[in-house]
Each structure stands twice: as structure tokens, then as C-alpha cells.
Image (cartoon, grey):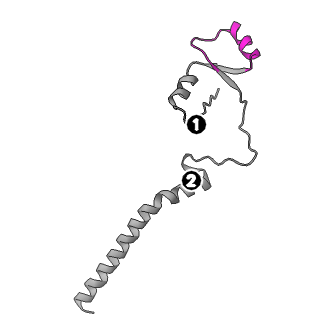
């Protein structure tokens, strides 16, 4: 095989590898998104049909002071599960985007 033929073959192989790598670069984001949706990896949650969150769910009231024991019964009677001092500010920061505040105690 002549030097020119070897150079041509090497150039074609290098060009094909480069085209493949560029194509894989463009395909990486959609392929990773599909992978995450199927496995739950990378922060994409999988929600099973009819699934329920563990623990208690309910209303949270935002207050500007520490809630004293004398106030707790009134809040509970009003249907509040918990009182905190920052949930409203976190939801305001979402600026209309879908958001949820999760408290683990």
C-alpha cells in the first residue's frame, strides 16, 4: 500500500471519528435525559401511579416569631401541621414557577 493510500485511509478514519464525536456531543443531552427519566438518576424523580408521599402532609403557616406552646393548639385547630419562619420567602423566590416546600423533622 502506498504512502498516499495510507494517508488517505488515516484521514478518512480520523474524519469519521471526529464526525462521530460531534454527533455524540449533540446526542448526549437527550440521551442523558432519557437515562435519568428511566432510572431516577440525576435528580429526576420517578413517580409511580397512585404513589403517596411518606409521612404527613398538610398546611404550613409562616410566622415572624417563635411559636409558643399557647399558640400551638390554636394553629392545630385551624388545620396547620407546622409553623415555620421561611417557607413563604422560599415560595416567593420561585417567582411563579412550580415549587414545593418540604420540611423534615
> Residue placed at 35% from the left, 70% from the top?
18
Q: Quadrant of the N terminus?
A: bottom left
> Residue placed at 61% from the left, 33% from the top?
100
Q: Position of residue 24 (x, y in %)?
A: 43, 65
**Which of 105 and 70 lies nearest the eye of the viewer?**
70
The image quarter containing residue 102 is top right
The image quarter containing residue 65 is top right
Q: Position of residue 71 (x, y in %)?
A: 69, 9
Residue 101 within the segment the image draws in magenta = no
Residue 65 within the segment the image draws in magenta = yes
In the depicted structure, whether residue 31 falls above or below residue 42: below
> Residue placed at 65% from the left, 49% from the top?
46
Give left or right: position of 49 versus 39.
right
**Residue at the extreme front:** 96
Span shown in magenta: 61-79
Q: Secondary structure at mark 1?
A: loop
User: Which of the marked residues, 2 or 1, is nearer the chain's N terminus?
Assistant: 2
Label 2 Cα crowd, 10 Å radius (few <14 / some 14-19 / many 20+): some
The image quarter containing residue 39 is bottom right
**Which of 26 and 32 lies nearest the eye of the viewer?**
26
Q: CA distance from mark 2 to mark 1?
A: 20 Å
Residue at the disc numbered 1: 98
Label 1 Cα crowd, 10 Å radius (few <14 / some 14-19 / many 20+): few
Q: Position of residue 49 (x, y in %)?
A: 74, 48
Residue at the disc numbered 2: 36
Amino acid at each position: 500500500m502506498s504512502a498516499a493510500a495510507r494517508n488517505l485511509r488515516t484521514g478518512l478514519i480520523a474524519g469519521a471519528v471526529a464526525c462521530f464525536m460531534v454527533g455524540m456531543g449533540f446526542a448526549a443531552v437527550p440521551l442523558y435525559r432519557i437515562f435519568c427519566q428511566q432510572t431516577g438518576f440525576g435528580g429526576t424523580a420517578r413517580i409511580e401511579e397512585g404513589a403517596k408521599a411518606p409521612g404527613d402532609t398538610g398546611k404550613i403557616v409562616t410566622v415572624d416569631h417563635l411559636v409558643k406552646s399557647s399558640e400551638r393548639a390554636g394553629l392545630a385547630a385551624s388545620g396547620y401541621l407546622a409553623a415555620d419562619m421561611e417557607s413563604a420567602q422560599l415560595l416567593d423566590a420561585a417567582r411563579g414557577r412550580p415549587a414545593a416546600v418540604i420540611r423534615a423533622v
